[in-house]
Image (cartoon, rainbow, N blue to C red):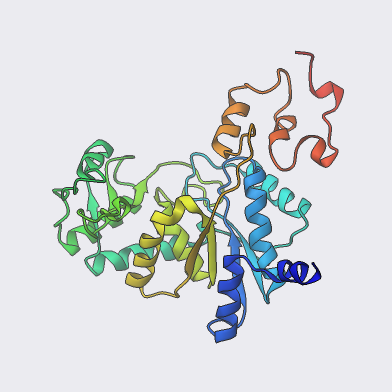
Amino acid sequence: MEEVKNTEEKSLNFIEEIIEEDLKSGKYRQVMTRFPPEPNGYLHIGHASSICLNFGLTLKYPGYTNLRFDDTNPVTEETEYVQSIKEDINWLGFVWQHELYASDYFDELYEMAVKLIKKGLAYVDDSTSEEMAAQKGTPTEPGTNSPYRDRSTEENLDLFARMKAGEFPDGSKTLRARIDMTHVNMLMRDPVLYRIKHAHHHRTGNKWCIYPMYDMAHGQSDSIEHITHSICTMEFVPHRELYDWLIEKLEIYTSRQYEFARRNINYTVTSKRKLLQLVNEDMSRAGMTRACRRSAAIAGGDTRRRRCAPSASTSA
């Protein structure tokens, strides 16, 4: 029995096995991870699992974890969520090495996009979202090329600069990667890298009116920070191929993405989007304040012994 117990204590999960091999082989001297939430809602129990995994690894192994806010969509982001997320991580007992934002890298990401254009690997597309969806094809049928796919490098550079300068309205143009419209992975069928959004950003104000998509920002931010093990949930498995493609074509530091199964609990909402809908549409307990309605999130309710004051709610 004692032997079985010792074996269980020494067992490693697959990410720990990868890390131990990487350290043993000398591939890395230390481990760098990151927790990269979007500041567009409150965290929930699924995020707590990711926080404990990312920060826990760098407590067990030499290295550190960054907190990086993926603030690439100014329409949905608020400073309130930034502060809430920081409080939740602190309450869980973790301390990040650097507080960073994808918006810290907007200038670098723009130059990376220019590099892709110069290499013939990206182009400005005037197709509407409906037209692009039709061009994508289906999982069993190949896509078709955009009529704007063969624009010259010079024209693409000019149009992208004018997009940045604010000459075009929202939705009129995008920057797309030039990969393969017949690729078996539909995410590799000329994905959008940049879109136009004339919206005030919570950190950069009105400096930018073009913003990188998730795939253009995430892997490159990992690379800039020299993240060694970029850990995310299984729904990002199809994104890994694009993650690797962009890093390879940009010739930047090679971060690696690893996926784990997300945590779900029966009869519990573990979707930030759905939790936010409950709050914004006032579908939670009648009369409760916005702060008290965080009870479904990490920081709320009796979990933290922070009951709402009687004055904060009314009887239903």
Q: In which quadrant of the rendered image does the C terminus lie?
A: top right
In the orientation shown, which residue stands out farthest toward the bottom?
A: 26
Residue 289 visible, this angle = yes
309, above or below 12, in the image? above
Q: Residue furthest top?
A: 316
Is there any visible trace of residue 207 in the rendered image? Answer: no
Q: Give the number of callouts.
A: 0
**Apparent side of residue 43 relative to residue 121 in the rendered image (left or right):** right
Tell whether 273 sits left or right of 199. right
Considering depth in this image, is 150 or 46 the residue closer to the camera? 46
Residue 128: quadrant of the picture: top left
Residue 298 lies, in percent from the top left, at 71, 43
Residue 137's x, y, as percent? 21, 44
Q: Residue 62, located in which quarter of the rendered image?
A: bottom right
Residue at 32% of width from left, 52% of height from top? Answer: 187
The foreground one among 6 and 279 is 6
Spot occupied by residue 21 in the image (x, y as percentages of width and height): 56, 79
Query: 144 above or below 161?
Result: above
- Residue appearing at x 79%, y 16% in the figure: 314
Quadrant occupied by the N terminus: bottom right
